[in-house]
Image (cartoon, helix red, strand yellow):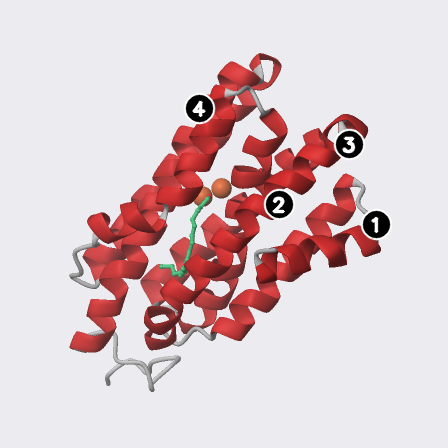
Amino acid sequence: MPQLQATPEIDFQSETYQDAYSRIDGIVIEGEQEAHDNYIQLTALLPDYKDELVRLSKMEARHKKGFEACGRNLKVVPDMVFANRFFADLHGNFQKAAAENKIATCLVIQALIIECFAIAAYNIYIPVADDFARKITEGVVKDEYSHLNFGEVWLQAHFEEVKAEVEAANRENLPIVWRMLNEVETDAHVLGMDKDALVEDFMIQYGEALANIGFSTRDIMRMSVYGLTGA
Ligand code: PL3
Ligand code: FE2
Ligand code: FE2
């Protein structure tokens, strides 16, 4: 007897699915690699947290291996050229902030924005993933919450000193996330992922993170709108 598929409407072997997967898998692999590099780079800015940051970076390296295996399992070659371009703006902003010793900005970009983007994407992907990728992604998403938590805890402890810097980093980087979401919308749709659900999940995670750090509901509303309008 053939195994029944949980989602019979998705054909993981179709050319359309595999073409979209080559870009999405590339993005995720690149995102995990950059997350690894960013946590390593942060050890220079936050020497007291070196061990914890190295531990986080090792988790990211494992995530990358997991998503590489997802691609191999579907016989898809990830499009790393596309993925590299996809992350270029956030990558550049992180590098600039690190060079200026702007710890809060680095944490907003990596531990808040990128981790919330990953959590939203993985949560939306899990119900429509193939069985192999679902198991991998379920393991990964648990880790991402702890990475988000690392950023929240540090920013919360330094809230008064970094509030203005966090707002500026939000204003500069949130519009980039909306552009990235628009860029991935069509391919994500092929994988069975809905853009509105992605945006909603992202805003819930990110808004909760800002609240945990110490921002008021009023601040959070204002900060979200800046991002959306690019104002
Ligand atoms: C940090 O730990 C990870 C950074 C990864 C960023 C991921 C962005 C994902 C965008 C599109 C989502 C699809 C999910 C599918 C997974 C194969
Ligand atoms: Fe990760
Ligand atoms: Fe992460």
Residue that mark 3 sits on:
159
Q: Is residue 186 above or below residue 228?
A: below
Residue at disc 1, secondary structure:
loop
Q: Is residue 68 shown left or right of residue 122? A: left
**Residue at mark 1 to residue at mark 4: CA–CA distance:** 31 Å
Mark 2: C-beta under 8 Å from nearest atom of ligand 1: no
Sequence-wise, which precedes: disc 2 or disc 1? 2
Residue that mark 1 sits on:
216
Residue that mark 2 sits on:
170
Which numbered marker is on residue 40?
4
> Mark 2 Cα within 10 Å, few/some/many (few <14, many 20+)?
many
**Residue at mark 2 to residue at mark 3: CA–CA distance:** 14 Å
Q: Residue at x 37, y 46 (%)?
A: 87
- Residue reaching furthest to the front: 231
Work out which quarter of the rendered image holds the C terminus and state it: bottom right
Q: Position of residue 58 (x, y in %)?
A: 42, 30
**Residue at mark 2 to residue at mark 4: CA–CA distance:** 22 Å
Q: Nearer the viewer, mark 2 or mark 4?
A: 2
Sequence-wise, which precedes: disc 3 or disc 1? 3
